[in-house]
Amino acid sequence: MSSAPAPGAPQAPAIPASATVASSDGDVLVVGQETTVLRDLYHAVLRARWSVALLGLTAVFLALNLCFAVLYMELGGVAHARPHSLADAFFFSVQTMGTIGYGAMYPESAAANVVVVFEAVTSLVVTAMATGLVFAKFSRSNARVAFTSKLVISPMHGVPTLSFRAGNRRGNLVVEAQLRLALVRTEQLPEGGTFYRMVDLELTRDRSPAFSRSWTVMHQIKPGSPLWGMTPAKMRVEEVEIMASLSGLDETSMQPLHARHRWLAADVVWGARHVDVLSELPDGRLLLDLRKFDVVEPTKATESFPYPAPPQLTAAP
């Protein structure tokens, strides 16, 4: 049973029925957004899954044929169609819109021929739009970039370093890949109120001429870094979020691609690093073990980095 809020405590705002989800994980709702269904329909179809897009196009095709079938049924004028038969009118409409060619049924009255003209024009427009959408969706290059589920902070050459790993799941090259890392945190203003500040995190290397299977991204926590003086407790209090954005050109299709990922404060592991995925075989060849892509291991606390490894990493298996 939930307890009633204490007197004087701030009341949680009611969620309007018009609120829409603005993030993939559903944690951001938007109220008052302008509705532009028809204007953004093209982008909505491109973002939709293949099954949803094909189901939607099929539904539009059947709905249009049903509308024209009602006209044919009411006006008549279709040879060999049963009077007031919606099924015959629907099948005749499908033949007209699909330009299949008439068999037993064909238009024989002026009214039916007029409707056939309108349906033929509608079919031409809808077919052109559907062809463009399917081609654009099929030819669009989607990034298949993997990011490690955890960020790690550990000393590297005596400097506390935040790092994570990115990899291209396709195995081909991403040409001129560029990665940006940003930190978002809440700040309490002296004038009152909360401000959500976004600052960039400088990387030791933010470009890769040929990004393939694995890229370890690092940010050194030095004076001037937004993470300087940060602790696990302070990170949780400030509701820190870290966002990565990667862009580049797909070598196969030479189309631009983009990928992004977000980590919360709970996703940051202090006193740990990602295990090496690259090792050398006895014959001199290199082995890339992607099974270790997300595996982390503890590091020793140092004077410059006094944070020990989490208990779950140091416990015996």
Image (cartoon, rainbow, N blue to C red):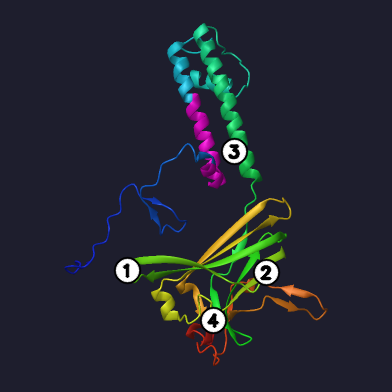
Looking at marks 1 and 4 on the same chain, the residue that comes earlier in the sequence is marked by 1
Residue 212 can be seen, yes or no? no
**In the rendered view, would you say 50 is above or below 232?**
above
Q: CA distance from mark 2 to mark 4?
A: 29 Å
Q: Position of residue 289 (x, y in %)?
A: 68, 73
- Picture quadrant of residue 13: bottom left
- In the picture, the disc for residue 214 is 2
**In the rendered view, would you say 246 is above or below 253?**
below
Magenta part, dominant SS: helix
Q: CA distance from mark 1 to mark 3?
A: 51 Å
Task: Tell me if label 1 and label 2 are in contact, CB under 8 Å.
Answer: no
Looking at marks 2 and 3 on the same chain, the residue that comes earlier in the sequence is marked by 3
Q: Choose between 10 and 75: the one closer to the eye.
A: 10
For discs 1 and 4, the disc positioned in front in the rendered view? 1
Residue type at mark 4 is: Pro
Instruction: Give me the residue at 66% from left, 52% from top.
Output: 256
- In the picture, the disc for residue 191 is 1
Task: Tell me if label 2 and label 3 are in contact, CB under 8 Å.
Answer: no
